[in-house]
Amino acid sequence: MSKVIEAEYLAKERVLKLAQPLDEIADHERVHVVIEQRQPAERNDWPKVGENAGCELARAVREAFGRDEIAV
């Protein structure tokens, strides 16, 4: 059987944390694992803004949400 699932690697504990349970696999059963590192998707759906518009947007977000650490 072959199944693809998503998992998070916890390096300190040397553990793969699965996004969903493996219902077909018994507790403590040994399995073969193939690792494929997933790249984050590019956000091409976000609008492009010029430098001045970007600063204005950042300033508006800072004022609306009280986020003083946002550099403008």
Image: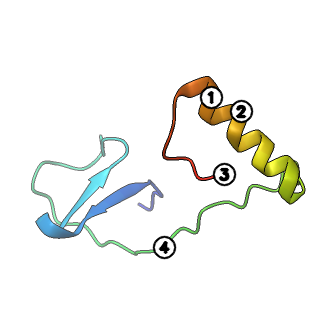
Residues at discs 2 and 1 in contact (Cβ within 8 Å)? yes
Under circle 2, the secondary element is helix
Residue for badge 3: 72
Residue for badge 4: 37
Q: Quadrant of the N terminus?
A: bottom left
Q: Residues within 10 Å of mark 4 (few under 14, many from 20)?
A: few
Residue 60 got which mark?
Answer: 2
Disc 3 residue type (three-letter): Val
Residue at position x 66%, y 51% in the image? 72
Percent from the top left, x then y, of residue 11? 21, 69
Percent from the top left, x then y, of residue 27? 12, 48
The quadrant holding residue 39 is bottom right
Disc 1 residue type (three-letter): Glu
Disc 2 residue type (three-letter): Ala
* Sequence-wise first label, 2 or 4: 4
| Nearest to the observer: residue 36 or residue 53 | 53
Disc 4 residue type (three-letter): Gln
Nearer to us: label 3 or label 4: 3
Spatial CA distance of label 4 from label 1 is 38 Å
The answer to whether residue 46 shows anywhere in this view is: no
Spatial CA distance of label 3 from label 1 is 11 Å
The answer to whether residue 16 shows anywhere in this view is: yes
Residue at position x 24%, y 50% in the image? 25
Q: Would you say 63 lies left or right of 33 here?
A: right
Residue at position x 48%, y 58% in the image? 4
Spatial CA distance of label 3 from label 2 is 10 Å
Instruction: Give the answer, above or below, for where 63 lies relative to 45.
Output: above
The image's colour scheme reads rainbow
Spatial CA distance of label 3 from label 4 is 34 Å
* Sequence-wise first label, 3 or 1: 1
